[in-house]
Amino acid sequence: MAGHPTFPDPDDHGSAPPDHTPRTPGVTVSDTSPAHPPGGAPPLPEAALRLLRDHGVDMPRLRRVLALLADGRWWGADDLVRGTGVAYTLVSSLLKALDEAGELATESAGRQSRVRLARPSGYAGAAGAAGDDLADPVAHLLPRYARAHAELARAVAEGPASDLDLDHVTATAETALRRALFLATRFDLHDRVLLCVGDHDLTSIALTLVCPGARAEVVDIDERVLAHIDALADRLDLRVRTHTADLRLGLPSTVRGVADVVFTDPPYTADGVELFVRRGVEGMADPRRGRVLVAYGASETTPKLAAATQSRLARMDLLFEAVWPDFNRYHGAESIGAASDLYVLRPLTRAPAPPSGDAARVYSQGVNAKEARGGLDAGRARAVLDRVREDLDGRGAADRGRGDGDGRGDGDGRGDGGRTAAGGAEPTLVGEWPSEVSAAGRVRLSTWMDAPAPVGDCAVLNLTGGWERLAARAALASAADTVYALVPSSAACVRDAAGQRGLRALVEPRFRVRFLRGFGADDLTAVRLTRRPPDVDEPGAGAPGGARARAEEGRGGVPEGERAQGVPDAAVDLLLTHVQERAHGTLTATLRAGLVEVSALGGRPANKRTARQAVSTAPWWLAGHTLLDLPEHRFAELRGVAAALLAQV
């Protein structure tokens, strides 16, 4: 290749002549192999040389471990893993071999042990010659962004703990910054959209710090992560919007087809990587003109796992433009070297091939791992449905005994309906149900959450088997008057008073809530939600669930007699109920329609134009959301928003 800096030009008379020394196979003429480093560095002890040679052509990775040990300090195995990116299995086997060769000193510190070289001076050549490492794509940019790194370090330190059920392992602050610099340098993201499919590592915050002209959309199921990102974006004035979603069911409609570039650090199973990347492609405006960046890692001792994942991605018509080894570093994940590679993928089609894996079991551990048990067998399912019928019959009889012909309950959850039992109609089954009990049909949970589904007076949602985080939103998605959401009794939303209060706050004022433990089995709890009837003691055109009912049930909310911004409590409740009964609609649309309806009932009708103008003044985060993808921490602000809008009309 004439003119290439690696090779001398034909006219370059100042170059050294080529070496034509005859070479005999198996005989080294001038040994500059990694075992004998160039640049005059002293050779390594024979025991170390044997270990390196046994590792074959990949020996430079093990040299990293020896280079750290050469400083003579005490090291733990995990520290060596994090410092080198070499898998724990290889590090521990290297340490064992060095120990057997008498090259290590060992000490125990509690459950942990530490090692150091007995003769560190003999390993001075382990690091090789200066500049031997391959160039890092963004290392030269890092010094310019010291302030951004400081902000990210603070954000990572203050962030929520990892959720092992979601395969969380926290990336370092420097990794978040490196990702942002790679994105901002490799791509033109000014006035363009990055979609983060999951963002426990704060890539959205890092990018918008580095490139303020970019906008980021974040989709995640962890409400703590979304609240943290929103708080950071508010404090730093960044263009980041968050959405709640269980990606196994699909991408929120408001972020489909909007992104130019996608970033994801998915669960490290083949099914998990495929699912998260697929959702990312669904979120792209024009996949063939964008890129999908994936942080993915597998131990070098298990290459078949990485091969299976890459095969999945290839079948999705994704071109591997680049793979940067060990680009991402983590506080943990030592089994894969506390590091992962950065894949740069280019979609070749608008829509990837159909899925080939299990979208329900995408995590490597916890309740959603492939090995986890969950769901209902036929016997438990029958017992649950028998309890539903008994509960409905009992509530209907209680209502008839009290003579409550209008079906109103007494506020304790035992007699607030009875409508579902009328005529003996079977409840609508939603989610995974055994064929023995669902011969009449069932509604898929993905269908239920995506659009309003035909339903009778009662729906029973099976949220066991890893779907319990959706309890409140799945209930809001129902048009039924009575909803039973079946979850494990260990679920966060039912196991203690704090979880129960949190669930109530999401579904009020539309529903009254009752928690029924031991529902069909000792380890199951049914959350019974019944449509709140008009409160006869509350003025305001049949407003549901007034202050009296809230006080009786001992819940939060606006105390009796208090008015938000001069607006009657009943009117605010009525507007919120209108929105909650149309949970699939965008919040801006449902609020506009609700303002027209509630103002008319209050005797001061507002037209559509007035309602539209009022909603245009609502907080910025309201737009682009339905109630089903609105982050949980925003629900608490909806009551104030509703009162402010009503005050304007």
Image (cartoon, rainbow, N blue to C red):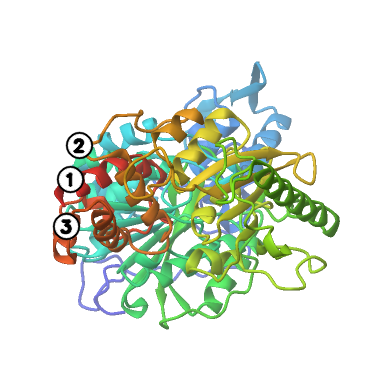
User: Mark 2: which secondary structure?
Assistant: loop
Residue most toward the right? 379
- Tell me the tag on residue 565: 2
Q: Which residue sits at x=21%, y=48%?
A: 646
Looking at the picture, does residue 602 appear above or below residue 195?
above
User: Mark 3: which secondary structure?
Assistant: loop
| Label pair 1/2, CB-CB below 8 angstroms | yes
Q: Is residue 12 left or right of residue 577?
A: left
Q: Which residue sits at x=62%, y=50%?
A: 485
Residue 353 position in % (x across, y down): 53, 81
Quadrant where the N terminus is found in the figure: bottom left
Mark 3 is surrounded, within 10 Å at the Cα level, by few (under 14), some (14 to 19) or many (20 or more) other residues, namely some
Between residue 281 and residue 608, name the one nearer to us: 608
Looking at the picture, does residue 288 appear above or below residue 186?
below
Q: Which residue sits at x=37%, y=36%?
A: 156
Q: Is residue 251 left or right of residue 458?
A: left
Mark found first going from the N terminus, 3 or 2: 2
Residue matched to label 3: 616
Tell me the CA gap for discs 1 and 2: 7 Å
Q: Is residue 286 left or right of residue 466?
A: left
Mark 2 is surrounded, within 10 Å at the Cα level, by few (under 14), some (14 to 19) or many (20 or more) other residues, namely few
- Tell me the tag on residue 517: none
Residue most toward the front? 403
User: Mark 1: which secondary structure?
Assistant: helix
Q: Which residue sits at x=64%, y=26%?
A: 104
Q: Is residue 572 visible?
A: yes
Residue type, numbered disc 2 = Gln
Residue type, numbered disc 3 = Ser
- Tell me the tag on residue 647: 1
